[in-house]
Image: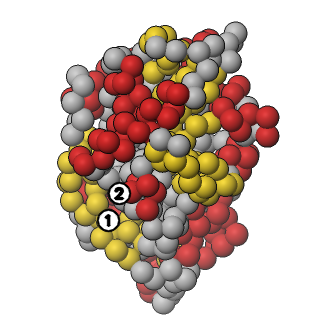
Amino acid sequence: MIPLNGRSPGERIKRKLSENVTEKRLGLIINPIAGLGGRVGLKGSDGVVIQEQARALGAVPKALERTVQAIESLAPFKDEFELITCPGEMGAEAARATEFKPTIIGSIMPGATTPQDTIDAASEMERLGVDLILFAGGDGTARDIFNAVADRVPVLGIPAGVKIHSAVFGTNPRYAGELAGLYLQDKATLVREAEVMDIDEEAVRAGVLSARLFGYLKVPYRRNLVQAVKTGSNPGERETLHSIASDVLENMDPECLYILGPGTTTRTITTLLGLEKTLIGVDVIAGDRLVAKDVNEEQLLELLDDQPAKVIVTPIGGQGYLFGRGNQQISPRVLKSLEVGETQGKGNLIIISTTDKIFSLNGRPLLVDTGDQELDQLLSGYVQVVTGYKGRMIYRISS
């Protein structure tokens, strides 16, 4: 395919070398179906069948939108580097939406991209000598990038997937773009090896959660701009979890719906009630009844139509995310209907966590990345966290 400037990528790069031009090169790859299964409650987007099911449920891709949020940060100095990307939904559309004039490589089948397209694009970008590969996706996309370039090229992820356990992603799309810009301008020179983690989506749907380390990628690093790897629960926390759940149950309003986010901490609440909790799904209870199990965004909105409700969430271990990672069903529309970002609705958000989980953040804030930047700002600030029976801690949320 001939790029917009009329030269092949190789010819353009050779010309720059002959002119002694040291312009940086940024590779951009978008997995256009990343995150497709999130708000419809499918716990991932891997596989054609799941993608078709997600679309049938009304899922709308968000990867393009989140990529645009990221690369808008690069616009002020876009003339200082060359952007190399893929055709259409795998990069060119986002680049043009932000007024970049990219060099386009390869070819794709619009609407039917595959992991191999990502692998091929990353391999070609390595061959062309890019300084950094910026990719939008989730853990599955990170695995594809790793399979292509291993630790030979620095990479950075724009978080756009459902499950994001890996430590190769920016804290949010905007920070991913900012860090990419700092790296290209030699203002962020620290590069670290970061874990590529993934879970077996089929196993999760069968009720078995198992995360696996696939390798390490080289990632530019600056504290608070890059997310940490997800960590699991401490097996010795059983008593603490029970005390947290007991406190929550004691203060529940029997006339109110309670939306329970994923996690072992929230699962303890249903355990004490004798109810079964979806492994990494979202459930709804009222009193000692299970009202709805493994719900998606639309089902939540229907339930909230005529009954008061609160949402109970726990931060992801090691990362601190409250919203935007693995619980996209609790979407901006759901949160706005609960008014959790407004003064009158602050009590509708209940955060529960062990103190060990909070202390493991090493002073980093709890995080929100809902995809709605205005809502994220409203959710930011100091909040109360239930840490035990009658136990409370004040901690900061940041976007």
Residue 180, given in percent of the width and then of the height, sits at: 52, 68
Colour style of the rendered protein structure: secondary structure
Residue 65 falls in image quadrant: top right
Looking at the rendered structure, the kind of residue marked 1 is Ala
Name the mark nearer the viewer: 2 or 1.
Answer: 2
Q: Which quarter of the figure is the C terminus placed in?
A: bottom right
Looking at the rendered structure, the kind of residue marked 2 is Val
Q: Is residue 375 above or below residue 188?
A: above
Q: Is residue 137 above or below residue 258?
A: below
Q: Nearer the viewer, residue 189 or 105?
A: 189
Residue 85, given in percent of the width and then of the height, sits at: 47, 56
Q: Is residue 32 above or below residue 8?
A: above
**At numbered mark 2, what does the secondary structure look like: helix, strand or loop?**
loop
Which residue position holds label 2?
A: 229
Which residue position holds label 1?
A: 194
Q: Is residue 171 above or below residue 144?
A: below
Q: Residue at x 28, y 56 (%)?
A: 196
Residue 146 left/right relative to 18:
left
| Marks 2 and 1 close (CB-CB < 8 Å) | yes
